[in-house]
C-alpha cells in the first residue's frame, strides 16, 4: 500500500516492509508502527537488527518473546536484501516467515529499507511504498502544515516551494516551518518565498537551463554569474549543466516513457523529470547531443589548461543560446 493510505489507516501485520525513495516517508512510516506497536515500553519491546548479516535464528528467537506492557514486540530489521529469501539456501526461512505472517501473534518484524524500493516476498506481508509524493500530494502536505499553524499559502507560492525544493519532502517541511515563523500570520505569498526559501543548488541549474530553453539570454548569463560569484568555481555550473542536458537528451530519446519510469531510470525525483521534459522540448535530439558534446569538451579543455574557466563557460553558454535561438 502507498504511504498515504497507511498514514490514514495504519494496519499492523506480523510481517511488514517499509521501503521507497523518500527517506523521510520511510522514517515517518516506521514511527507510526512504533507508536502503535510499542507505545509504552519501547526500551523493552523494541529490538533493532542489522539486515546485512542477519542471523535468522536470532530473529525467530526474538519474535518468540512475549511483549511486556505493550500490544506487541517489534523487531526492526534494517537494510535487508530480500534476494536472500528467494534462493534455495533460505527456502526454509521464507516458509517459516510465510507461516509467521499468516498467524496472529504478539510480535511484528518490520523490514526497513529507506531510500530504495524493495518488495517483500513473504506471503501476507504488508508492504508500505514510500516513493516520492506527487505534486498534488506535496501540495496537500504544504496546505496541512501551513493550516495547522493558522496561516494560508497562495497556489503560486505553493507551486514555487515545490519547484525550489525539487519536490523533496523533508526540505519542503523545513522551508514551511521557516516561512511560518517568518510570516507569523496571514497568507504566505511568492515574495515571502523569495526572501526566506533557500533554493536547492540543483534548482538554480534548472533555472539556468530554463532560461536557455526560453531563449532568455540575459537571464541565463545573470544566473551563471551569480553561481560563479558565489562558488568561485566554474565546475559548480559545468558539471550539473552537463548532467542536466544529458538527462534532457535521455528524456527526449525515451519520450514514450512516463515521468515515473524516467525518474526511476535516472535516479531523480518525478517532479524533476516533469520540469526537465518541458525544457527538453525546446531542442531536437541532435541539438541536445551537440550541447552535451560542447560541455564535455569545455570540461576537458579547462582541466587540460587550454582555456580559462570564465572565458570557456561564457563561450559555451553563447554557443548553446545560439543553438536555441536558431529554433525561433
Image: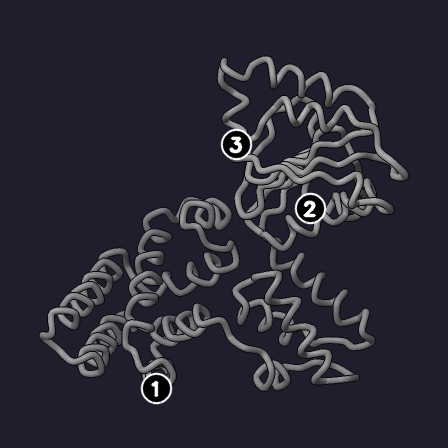
Q: Quadrant of residue 51?
A: top right
Q: Which residue is mark 3?
A: 53
Q: Please identify the quadrant where the N terminus is shown.
A: top right
What label sits on residue 29 in the rendered view?
none
Colour approach in the figure: one colour
At x 18%, y 70%, the residue is 298
Instruction: State the residue lying farthest toward the left.
Output: 306
At x 80%, y 74%, the residue is 149
Q: CA distance from mark 3 to mark 2?
A: 28 Å
Going from the N terminus, do you reach mark 1 or mark 2 first? 2
Residue 194 horizontal side relative to residue 31, left or right: left
Q: Secondary structure at mark 2?
A: helix
Q: Secondary structure at mark 1?
A: helix
Label 2 CA crowd tier, 10 Å (few <14, some 14–19, many 20+): many
What label sits on residue 3 in the rendered view?
2
Q: Is residue 93 above or below residue 261?
A: above
At x 22%, y 82%, the residue is 310
Amino acid at each position: 500500500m502507498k504511504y498515504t493510505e497507511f498514514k490514514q489507516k495504519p494496519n499492523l501485520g506480523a510481517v511488514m516492509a517499509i521501503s521507497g525513495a523518500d527517506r523521510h516517508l520511510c522514517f515517518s512510516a516506521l514511527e507510526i508502527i512504533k507508536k502503535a506497536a510499542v507505545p509504552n515500553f519501547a526500551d523493552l519491546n523494541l529490538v533493532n537488527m542489522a539486515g546485512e548479516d542477519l542471523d535468522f535464528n536470532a530473529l525467530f528467537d526474538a519474535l518468540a518473546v512475549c511483549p511486556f506492557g505493550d500490544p506487541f514486540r517489534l523487531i526492526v530489521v534494517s537494510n535487508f536484501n530480500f534476494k536472500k529469501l528467494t534462493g534455495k539456501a533460505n527456502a526454509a526461512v521464507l516458509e517459516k516467515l510465510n507461516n509467521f505472517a499468516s498467524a496472529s501473534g504478539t510480535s511484528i518484524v518490520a523490514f526497513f529499507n529507506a531510500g530504495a524500493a524493495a518488495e517483500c516476498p513473504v506471503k501476507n506481508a504488508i508492504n508500505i511504498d514510500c516513493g516520492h509524493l506527487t505534486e498534488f500530494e506535496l501540495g496537500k502536505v504544504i496546505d496541512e502544515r501551513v493550516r495547522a499553524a493558522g496561516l494560508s499559502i497562495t497556489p503560486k507560492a505553493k507551486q514555487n516551494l515545490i519547484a525550489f525544493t525539487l519536490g523533496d519532502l523533508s526540505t519542503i517541511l523545513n522551508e514551511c516551518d521557516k516561512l511560518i515563523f517568518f510570516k507569523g500570520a496571514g497568507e504566505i505569498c511568492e515574495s515571502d518565498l523569495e526572501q526566506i526559501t533557500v533554493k536547492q543548488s540543483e534548482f538554480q541549474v534548472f533555472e539556468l537551463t530554463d532560461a536557455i530553453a526560453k531563449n532568455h539570454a540575459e537571464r541565463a548569463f545573470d544566473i551563471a554569474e551569480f553561481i560563479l560569484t558565489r562558488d568561485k568555481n566554474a565546475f559548480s555550473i559545468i558539471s550539473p549543466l552537463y548532467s542536466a542536458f544529458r538527462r534532457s537528451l535521455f528524456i527526449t530519446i525515451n519520450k514514450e516513457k512516463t515521468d515515473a519510469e524516467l525518474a526511476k531510470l535516472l535516479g531523480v525525483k518525478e517532479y524533476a523529470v516533469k520540469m526537465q521534459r518541458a525544457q527538453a522540448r525546446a531542442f531536437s535530439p541532435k541539438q541536445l547531443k551537440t550541447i552535451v558534446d560542447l560541455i564535455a569538451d569545455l570540461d576537458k579543455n579547462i582541466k587540460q589548461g587550454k582555456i580559462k574557466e570564465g572565458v570557456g563557460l561564457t563561450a559555451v553558454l553563447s554557443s548553446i543560446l545560439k543553438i536555441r535561438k536558431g529554433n525561433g
